[in-house]
């Protein structure tokens, strides 16, 4: 019979309890039994897929299943919760890898650094300090190495090539549109702001084309209402639609969607007056 110093509420089939005797932690089942009859220095509630994180002496961490067994029978310096079927783990040599639900290290590979899986791909840094993208089989999707790489999002990773240019790496290992840029932003509402070598900005579409084949001195991220705000060389602004057309023939001192009113933007005319502009490009009095 155990006496408990602390008892948490049940999370799924188990509740974390702390022993009065040695202040260790364990998982108490609804049957009143201690899971695996094991006690730990620390423990977290069971989470996605029926696993909990545990810590034992000397700072070792593991993942315990509802069967009371440590996943893979392995202990690590660091473990994380599962993301897309993998836990990021750090071994005692401070190398990082991915522990799968089968208890095996993905590809039996260890890296300097890893980022969590997203959309079926993960970014890893090898001994050479360069980054690659791997799939859920542990295979690199491209033979190329990159100076930097972002997590996969909206179907691609923004990678910085060896020539310091940026591109969008797709799951097939090829660059979107086979195009590189001086700078690249993430896709927002279907479009990504990109800068070419002469400093001009445009919007990259998901098919690799430039929206409206138009370039500007500056461009904002695309708003949810389906428009981007662009600046030309004389410092005046306009609104660019998702079809690549300017919303108005008139250019403005400023365009602001922040306090959007039913999709309308606040514009400042060249005479300093303020108006609302709707999705058809019609101007209204601003009150």
Image (cartoon, rainbow, N blue to C red):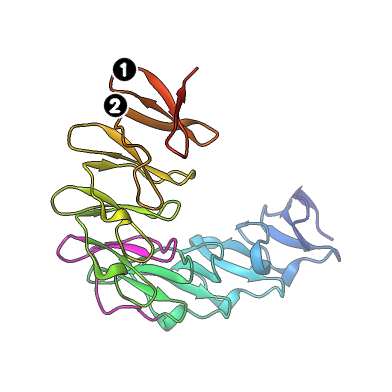
In the depicted structure, whether residue 107 falls above or below residue 81 = below
**Quarter location, residue 277:** top left
**Quarter location, residue 165:** bottom left
Instruction: Tell me residue 258's x, y (percent).
Output: 45, 32
Residue that mark 1 sits on: 272
The residue positioned 67% from the left and 63% from the top of the image is: 39
Query: Is mark 2 in CB contact (under 8 Å) with mark 1?
Result: yes
Q: Is residue 206 magenta?
A: no
User: Taking 225 as reference, is 195 left or right?
Assistant: left
Instruction: Tell me residue 63's x, y (percent).
Output: 59, 68
Going from the N terminus, do you reach mark 2 or mark 1 first? Answer: 2
Q: Is residue 163 magenta?
A: yes
The magenta stretch is: 139-165
Q: Nearer the viewer, residue 76 or 193?
A: 193
**Quarter location, residue 178:** bottom left
Q: Nearer the viewer, residue 201 or 187?
A: 201
Q: Residues within 10 Å of mark 2 (few under 14, many from 20)?
A: some
* Secondary structure of residue under mark 2: loop
Q: Main secondary structure of the magenta part?
A: loop
The residue positioned 36% from the left and 17% from the top of the image is: 273
Q: Residues within 10 Å of mark 1 (few under 14, many from 20)?
A: few
In the depicted structure, whether residue 187 falls above or below residue 233 = below
In the depicted structure, whether residue 140 falls above or below residue 246 = below
Residue that mark 2 sits on: 253
Can the viewer see residue 92?
no
Instruction: Tell me residue 47's x, y (percent).
Output: 66, 61
Instruction: Tell me residue 59's x, y (percent).
Output: 49, 60
């Amino acid at each position: 019979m155990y006496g408990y110093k602390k008892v948490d509420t049940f999370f799924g089939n188990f509740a974390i309890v702390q022993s009065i005797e040695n202040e260790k932690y364990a998982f108490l089942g609804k049957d009143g039994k201690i899971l695996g009859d094991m006690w730990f220095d620390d423990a977290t509630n069971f989470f996605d897929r029926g696993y909990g994180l545990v810590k034992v002496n000397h700072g070792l961490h593991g993942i315990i299943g509802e069967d009371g067994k440590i996943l893979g029978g392995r202990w690590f310096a660091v473990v994380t919760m599962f993301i897309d079927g993998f836990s990021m783990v750090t071994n005692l040599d401070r190398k990082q890898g991915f522990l799968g639900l089968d208890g095996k290290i993905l590809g039996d590979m260890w890296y300097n650094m890893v980022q969590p899986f997203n959309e079926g791909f993960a970014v890893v840094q090898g001994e050479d300090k360069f980054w690659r993208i791997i799939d859920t089989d542990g295979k690199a999707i491209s033979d190329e190495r990159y100076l930097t790489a972002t997590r996969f999002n909206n179907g691609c990773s923004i990678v910085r090539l060896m020539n310091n240019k940026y591109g969008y790496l797709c799951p097939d290992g090829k660059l979107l549109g086979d195009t590189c840029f001086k700078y690249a932003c993430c896709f927002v509402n279907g479009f990504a702001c990109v800068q070419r070598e002469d400093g001009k900005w445009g919007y990259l579409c998901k098919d690799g084309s430039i929206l409206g084949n138009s370039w500007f001195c500056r461009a904002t991220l695309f708003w949810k209402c389906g428009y981007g705000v662009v600046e030309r060389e004389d410092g005046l602004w306009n609104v660019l639609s998702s079809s690549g057309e300017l919303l108005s023939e008139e250019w403005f001192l400023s365009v602001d969607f922040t306090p959007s009113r039913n999709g309308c933007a606040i514009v400042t005319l060249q005479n300093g007056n303020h108006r609302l502009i709707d999705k058809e490009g019609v101007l209204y009095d601003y009150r």
